[in-house]
Every structure is written in C-alpha cells, then in structure tokens.
Image: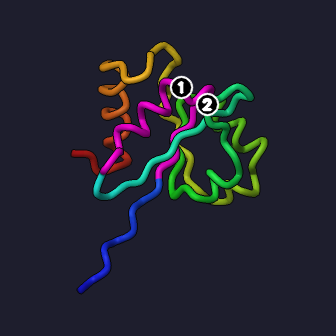
Amino acid sequence: MSASPALRKLLFVCSQNKWRSLTAERLFDDHPHYEARSAGTEPGARVRVTAGHLGWADIIFVMERRHADRLREKFADALGSTRVVVLRIPDKYKFGDSQLVALLRQKLQEHLLLP
C-alpha cells in the first residue's frame, strides 16, 4: 500500500479575514490536493496572521500588495523563501460573493490545479 502524497498547503491573506481570504479558503474545503487556511493582517482580523501560519504554508496568496508588504515587514524571517503571490483582488466583495469566487478561480488557475 502506497502512502498518499502530501497535500500542498495554501495560505490566503487579506486585511480582516472575513470576506476575501475566508472565501478563498472555503474554495479548497475537501480538495484532494490542497489544504487551505486563511488569516488577516489587521489587529481586528477574525484570525490574525502569525509566523506559524507563514511557516506552515507552501505558498501564500495575498489579496493586495500592501498585505505582502506587511508580511515582509513583520515576518521576514518566518517567510524565508516561501512564495508570496499578489492576487490584486480589491476589498469590495462580501464573503462567498459569486463574483469574488469567479475572480479567485480565474486568478488562482495560473498557480494551482483547479477542478
């Protein structure tokens, strides 16, 4: 019996971890190849990003360049050589918005294998 391949670990980051990054995380619920988590950069975030999140992730997706800048500023050591991808998704969508889901799928398909 062969061992199943390890899941690739994805971290999605936005400001508050309430709409964009949480919607992105939910896209990967029960996905056979990826495990996803999400966090926010701001003090009032639902789940605030930590060095532990960054160390866990194989790849990090941020919604805006300022999120990447904040991660590099606060967690340079924890980031190491982990790839950070800026998706350029503005903060104008609510959680689960169909337009947000479509935009996430479009932007992620060049980086990940999506169904």
Total marks in image: 2
Q: Which amino acid does label 2 sit on?
A: Arg
Bin the neighbour count of mark 2 within 10 Å (Cα to Cα): few under 14, some 14-19, many 20 and up: some
Q: Nearer the viewer, residue 22 or 62?
A: 22
Q: Which of marks 2 and 1 is nearer the N terminus?
A: 1
Residue at figure coordinates x 59%, y 38% from the top left: 39
Where is residue 105 drawn, in percent x and y? Answer: 32, 34
Quarter residue 115 falls in: top left
Quarter containing the N terminus: bottom left
What residue does disc 1 label? 18
Q: Is residue 22 above or below residue 1?
A: above
Q: Nearer the viewer, residue 114 or 26?
A: 26
Bin the neighbour count of mark 1 within 10 Å (Cα to Cα): few under 14, some 14-19, many 20 and up: some
Q: What residue type is labelled 1?
A: Lys
Asked whether the residues under the numbered discs 2 and 1 touch, taking CB atoms below 8 Å apart as contact, a structural biologist would say yes
Asked if the magenta segment contains residue 14, the reply would be: yes
Where is residue 106 drawn, in percent x and y? Answer: 31, 32
What residue does disc 2 label? 46
- Mark number for residue 31? none
Cα distance in 3D space between marks 2 and 1? 6 Å
Asked if the magenta segment contains residue 95, the reply would be: no
Q: Residue furthest bottom?
A: 1
| Helix, strand or loop at mark 1 | loop
Q: Which residues make up the magenta segment?
A: 10-30
